[in-house]
């Protein structure tokens, strides 16, 4: 059996080890880079559709009227 002081030291070492593992895991996630979430993919999809619609032939006359250099 361990006395209270030894148990406290063992507990402190275990907690430090757990904190270090959590910190290492967080650093590994940062090193991997961020993964796109479903919401990010949806925003990219909507942005690509909006870009295709605004570049389409229906808007070409508007661009020429507003900015003649683009014609």
Image (cartoon, grey):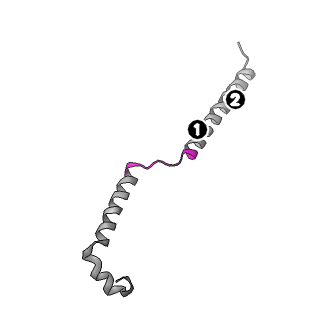
Quick one: 34 or 52, which is closer to the camera? 52
The quadrant of the rendering that contains the C terminus is bottom left
Residue that carries the numbered disc 1 in the rendered image: 25
Looking at the image, which residue is at 69% across and 29% down? 12
* Front tag of 1 and 2: 1
The tag earlier along the polypeptide, 1 or 2, is 2
Please tell me which residue is depicted at 29% across the width and 79% down the height of the picture.
60
- Residue ID at (37%, 85%): 67
Q: Circle 1 sits in a helix, a strand or a loop, which is it?
A: helix
Percent position (x, y) of residue 11?
67, 26
Q: Which of 69 and 67 is in front in this view?
A: 69
Packing grade of label 1 (10 A; few <14, some 14-19, many >=20) is few
- The residue shown at (73%, 17%) is 3
Q: Position of residue 27 (x, y in %)?
A: 60, 43
71 within the magenta span: no
Considering every residue shown, the one lying at the far front of the view is 71
Location of residue 7 (image quadrant): top right
56 relative position to 25: left or right: left
Q: Is mark 2 on a helix, strand or loop?
A: helix
Q: Position of residue 62 (x, y in %)?
A: 29, 82
Task: Name which quarter of the figure residue 61 lies in.
Answer: bottom left
User: Magenta stretch?
Assistant: 30-38
Q: How many marks?
A: 2
- Residue 58 image offset from top left, x and y in percent: 24, 76
Q: Residues within 10 Å of mark 2 (few under 14, many from 20)?
A: few
Q: Which of the two residues, 28 or 20, is positioned nearer the viewer here? A: 28
Is 34 displayed left or right of 68 in the figure? Answer: right
Residue 26, located in which quarter of the rendered image? Answer: top right
Nearer to us in this view, 69 or 48: 69
Q: Residue 12 carries which label?
A: 2
Position of 64 relative to 26 (above/below): below
Q: Quadrant of the N terminus?
A: top right
């Amino acid at each position: 059996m361990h006395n209270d002081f030894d148990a406290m030291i063992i507990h402190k070492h275990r907690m430090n080890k757990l904190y270090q593992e959590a910190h290492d895991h967080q650093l590994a996630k940062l090193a991997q880079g961020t993964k796109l979430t479903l919401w990010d993919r949806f925003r990219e999809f909507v942005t690509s559709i909006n870009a295709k619609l605004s570049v389409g032939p229906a808007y070409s006359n508007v661009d020429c009227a507003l900015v003649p250099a683009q014609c």
